[in-house]
Image: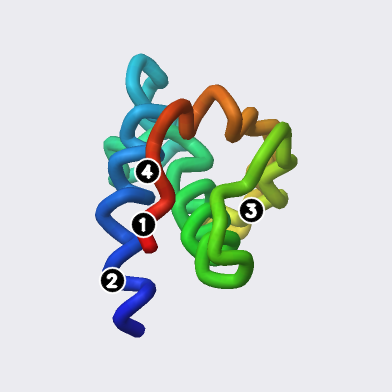
Amino acid sequence: MQKQKRYEALVEQIVEGWAEGKPANQMPGSTSTKPCGYYRLTNYLLEYMLLHNAFPEGVHAMPEGRDRFNQVEPSFPVDFDSLIGDAEFPL
């Protein structure tokens, strides 16, 4: 749990960088101001860091998701090398 708390702020910072310039979720009825995939990427990155004690490298496909209406949100690629840049992994 302590490790998770340590990673959460960094994950939020990284994903916010990814979200810059992307439009808010356009699905009808969406109340989120975040782009589609924001929460999937956040969860994926945090879970990866907790499991591997490292940042992901290279391109990873985010899994498909479901919105609050149970509609499929498609998978999308994320290049973690460019997304993470020179961020240091918290020890």
Q: Which residue is mark 2?
A: 5
State the CA–CA distance, disc 2 to disc 1: 11 Å
From the image, tell me which residue sits under label 4.
30
Disc nearest the viewer among 4 and 2: 2
Q: Is residue 24 left or right of residue 55?
A: left
- Mark positioned earlier in the residue sequence (4 or 3): 4
Marks 1/4: CA–CA distance: 34 Å
User: Element at badge 3?
Assistant: strand
Residue at the bottom extreme, as displayed: 1
Q: On the rendered structure, is 61 left or right of 3?
A: right
Instruction: Tell me the distance, in whole angstroms, between the alpha carbons under discs 2 and 3.
Output: 24 Å
Which quadrant of the view contains residue 91? Answer: bottom left
Give the residue type that dot 4 points to: Ser
Q: By what rule are the colours in the image chosen? A: rainbow
The label nearer to you, 4 versus 3, is 3
From the viewer's perspective, is the residue at label 2 or at label 1 nearer? 1
Q: State the mark number for residue 90.
A: 1
| Dots 2, 1 in contact, CB < 8 A | no
Instruction: Assign a secondary structure to mark 4.
Output: loop
Q: Nearer the viewer, residue 1 or 88?
A: 88
Hey, what amino acid is under mark 3?
Answer: Gly
Residue matched to label 3: 65
